[in-house]
Amino acid sequence: MLKQAIENLGNRTIQGVWRMGFAVRFFVATLLHSGTAFRRFGLTIREMYFTGVLSLIIILVSGLFVGMVLGLQGYETLQRYGSESALGTLVALSLVRELGPVLAGLLFASRAGSAITAEIGLMKATEQLSAMEMMAVDPIARVVAPRFWAGVISMPLLAALFSALGIFGGYLVGVKVIGVDEGSFWSQMQSAVDFEQDILNGVIKSVVFGIAITAIALFEGYDAPPTAEGVSGATTRTVVTSSLAVLALDFVLTAFMFRGLN
Amino acid sequence: MQNDNLVEIEDVAFGYNARPVLKGINLTARRGQVIAIMGSSGCGKTTLLRLIGGQIKPGQGVVRVAGESLGELDQAGLYRLRRKMGMLFQFGALFTDMSVFDNVAFQLREHTDLPQDAIRDLVLMKLHAVGLRGAAQLMPAELSGGMARRVALARAIALDPMLVMYDEPFAGLDPISLGVTGNLIRRLTDTLGLTSLVVTHDVQESLKIVDYVYFVSEGVIVAEGTADEIRASGLPYVHQFVHGEADGPVPFHYPAPAYADDLQLGARHA
């Protein structure tokens, strides 16, 4: 009984380490074969449509509502201290530093990440990737690399749009509905938000999230067992793993960028 | 002088993890012939095709295509050789996000610098050869199983390969599609000067079109010969296979304890 348990534990450990090694090799191979994604940029643009443009609706609507809620909650808290004129600063900093990249990342993982995994997994299950290999076309260069770079490029753009719509939502609720002074809303935001400290760091975060989510989604699809159950399991793992990766990476990046640990 | 044999397999063994699938296979495919590799499901036929395509490497022995040993080739060498091969997968493996036209044009666009007009003409010629020129703008989801396989065949011959491999080309086809596919394999082999390797367990259809047959069972070649020799073979395995008998060297029952023991007949009457 105990021997069996130890054997199972050993097997799982070996499989885990092997899978980790395969994931690293897969990621390195994707980077090394990225030439195609840039030489034939049309392939990457096409994938940007599927990962980026088709994610726009959910990103824009979510951004708008998150900004509107921030406007309401922020006003409720700030007016207790007579600082409601700082509403613009609160909404903008919350979105640009944290909520924009993180929430856009989580939505991107659910919408685009799962779609990438399902597509690659089904291509594998229906032997499309093998067919490509037999036609002397490397699937990593032709299929994986363009999707990877499309995800990496799309993610910061989506996060920026999320933040922009969020600020607009905060403005609608704070200024147009509640009646915060429009001048102080925008001017305090302008003076408090620093390009390097806030906006650039937010962009860096969203790029890192884009790399993590797309790499996980592609790997899970490529490594999925070629069955219906295998593809469905891989799709679930993509959403769970990449969402957790976004949250963990956000903590680490925030700690370094904004000295949050001090 | 050009070797008469396009594919040579010498003493090849291969296994998945600890499970041996092929245990010392010897096989040759002469240029211009249609060769069938037959055997029951799971006997290693498809593995054999994957070895010839260089998708997997043998644990032992040599696989040679056009005189080149696949085990000694790097990826660039393998890809160079694969441009001279075509493969028809069991269910076509068409790219589902591309039209029929784009599927057939795929290799031409990836491997040649031909102008669009020339690609268009070549694609229509290949589609015409399989009778589907009129379906050029359809998507794979709009095709029947037989049509999908014919499109895949047009795609496989797009670069005029010297070797085309077919993985179960007759599986799941209606009688008309079955005849059409069989005739196409024979006609394309003869007119284009190809060599065709057909992995199948459809005995009757394949014996109509093949030049030579290899029978694989339990990882080894158990019989070989021309279609007539196979039909007349007295070997129990070949006889069972060709005549579709339920029981024989390949047993009907999966290994199990004695029937009476399993039903606990002794215990109940005790």
Image (cartoon, coloured by chain):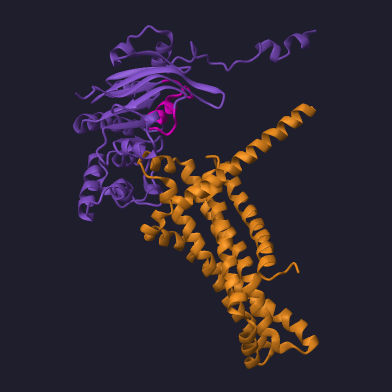
Residue A25, image x and y in percent?
A: 53, 45
For the residue pair B83 and A131, the one nearer the viewer reads as B83
Q: Is residue B69 positioned above or below B212 on the image?
A: below
Q: Quadrant of residue B223?
A: top left
Please say if A15 is above or below B252.
below
Residue at (58% x, 50% y) in the render = A235
Residue B95 percent across, percent down from the top left: 39, 47
Query: Residue A99: horizontal and vertical position, in percent?
Result: 65, 70
Q: Is residue A106 left or right of residue A129?
A: right
The answer to whether B210 is drawn above or below residue A136 in the figure is: above
Q: Is residue A189 visible?
A: yes
Q: Which chain is orange?
A: A
Q: Residue at x 45, y 63 (%)?
A: A49
In the image, residue B219 lies in the stretch drawn in magenta: no
**Chain represented in purple:** B
Residue closer to the observer: A15 or B179: A15
**Residue interval drawn in magenta:** B39-57
